[in-house]
Amino acid sequence: MSTHTINSRDIAARIFEDQNQIRFAESEVFYWSARSNIVFYNPALFDSVVGVYKLLHETGHALLEHATFESAPELLSLEVAAWTKAKELASDYGITINQDYIENCLDSYRDWLHKRSMCPACKTVSTEIAANTYKCFNCSQKWVVSPDQRSRCYRQKT
């Protein structure tokens, strides 16, 4: 019986080398900035394969040239596409991204989108009427939310 250990730091170094058309920069969190064309990453997380998963995911966004989203369904679509690309890239490095990990990440977006859609007045869940703007089906309250998925869910009545 052989055991195969993954050296996450070596894989991250290979990703940086292989994806040299992408700019990478250290940060506290992993994210793709379309505005600055940089994948930000936290090198401390390369102690485990999860750091590589995150790096591959953000690299997926970069390679797919994801920029902005106009609606909740579009955001989820971009996230799914980035994870699909990350899985393709992972195979180049002899690793498989755990599907449960991917689903947990997607669930965090679903949860965030659900919180954004909750009316600040009556707590009814509604849908966007325009980018980052919601209107309650129940009480007709309108509210605006932040487009930044890394932010907390702040709802402002309009």
Image (spheres, grey):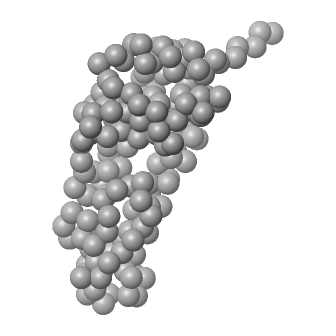
Establish if 77 lies above or below 12: below
Residue ID at (41%, 31%):
25
Q: How many marks do you count on the picture? A: 0
Residue 96 x/y as whole percent: 55, 24
Establish if 86 lies above or below 127: above
Residue ID at (30%, 27%):
63
Residue 10 falls left or right of residue 40 = right
Residue 3 x/y as whole percent: 75, 13
Residue ID at (57%, 40%):
101
Q: Which of 146 and 84 is in front in this view?
A: 146
> Where is the N terminus found, in terms of image quarters?
top right
| Quarter where residue 57 is shown | top left
Residue at the limit of the structure toward the left, as seen here = 130
Q: Which of 42 and 3 is in front in this view?
A: 42
Residue 117 x/y as whole percent: 36, 71
Residue ID at (64%, 30%):
48
Residue 120 falls left or right of residue 105 = left
Residue 61 falls left or right of residue 131 = right
- Asked whether residue 97 appears in the rendered view, the answer is no
- Asked whether residue 77 appears in the rendered view, the answer is yes
